[in-house]
Image (spheres, rainbow, N blue to C red):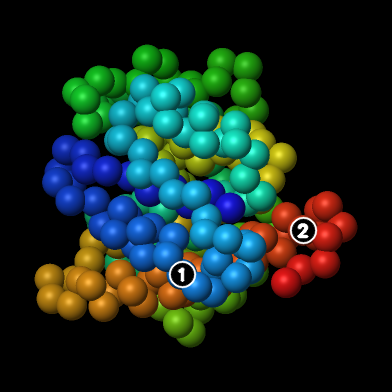
Amino acid sequence: MLITAFGPFPGMPVNPSEAVARLLARSPRLALAAGGRPALRILPTAYAALATHLEPALAEAPAAVLMIGVAGRSRRVRVEMRAVNRASRLFPDAGGRLAAHLTLEPEGPFQRRAGPAAVKALAQLRGRIPVRSSRDAGRYLCNASYYRALAGPVPVLFLHIPRPPRSGARAWAQRLAAAFAEVAVLLLREARGRTGVPPP
């Protein structure tokens, strides 16, 4: 199991996705389901990190991938149902660089969609935290990393989180991490269903 989050970027000097991901990676519930502690990668918010950080993590062939990013204007957690083959050349990454092209992969499909676990995850999260489905992961590193990860053979899901509250940020992060642990378990079950291995 692989969990990813992002470091800071312009306008977000402290990225809350990192705190949630670190708590999630220490979840006993997830460790039990995964048969060990999941791998954790905090990705620099830079286009170069797709090759230097994400690609090597995916090359380790995790059973499933849960990606977390922040959507500063959102008020709810967003379950991203797809990623698109588009980038923006308006917003520089944390290193001050723009996307090289308007498409992420010149020969790639227009979109890549999440698997059945996305709908199940949405249902799982409702009643626990404010959540909604989304068909727009943006045109930044969140969408770019999701598009790349969805090209692989394993279940992948991206969750966008809002900014934390001004008070109680730690409790908020713990609440999200506990809810996301169940989503990660759903991804592992989907992965085992694909291979014929009984779910935990």
**Residue 188, percent across and down?**
67, 60
Q: Is residue 9 visible?
A: yes
What residue is at 64 percent from the left and 39 percent from the top?
A: 61
Between the C-alphas of marks 2 and 1, the distance is 20 Å
Q: Viewer-proximal residue, 163 or 62?
A: 62
Q: Residues within 10 Å of mark 2 (few under 14, many from 20)?
A: some
Q: Is residue 18 above or below residue 111?
A: below
Mark positioned earlier in the residue sequence (2 or 1): 1
User: Residue farthest to the right?
Assistant: 196
Which mark, by number, is residue 192? 2
Q: Is residue 155 above or below residue 181?
A: above
SS type, badge 2: helix
Residue 110: percent from the left, percent from the top?
60, 30
| Circle 1 residues within 10 Å: few <14, some 14–19, many ≥20 | some
Amino acid type at circle 1 is: Ser
Of circles 2 and 1, the one toward us is: 1
Left or right, 189 with reference to 42: right
- Where is residue 159 shown, x and y percent of the image? 45, 57
Quarter of the image with the C terminus in it: bottom right
- Residue 27's label in the rendered image is 1
Can you give x and y, in whole percent of width and height, for residue 145 in the image? 47, 36
Amino acid of disc 2: Arg
Q: Identify the residue shown where x is 63% and y is 17%.
A: 107
The residue lying toward the viewer, choosing from 33 and 130, is 33
Q: Nearer the viewer, residue 32 or 148?
A: 32
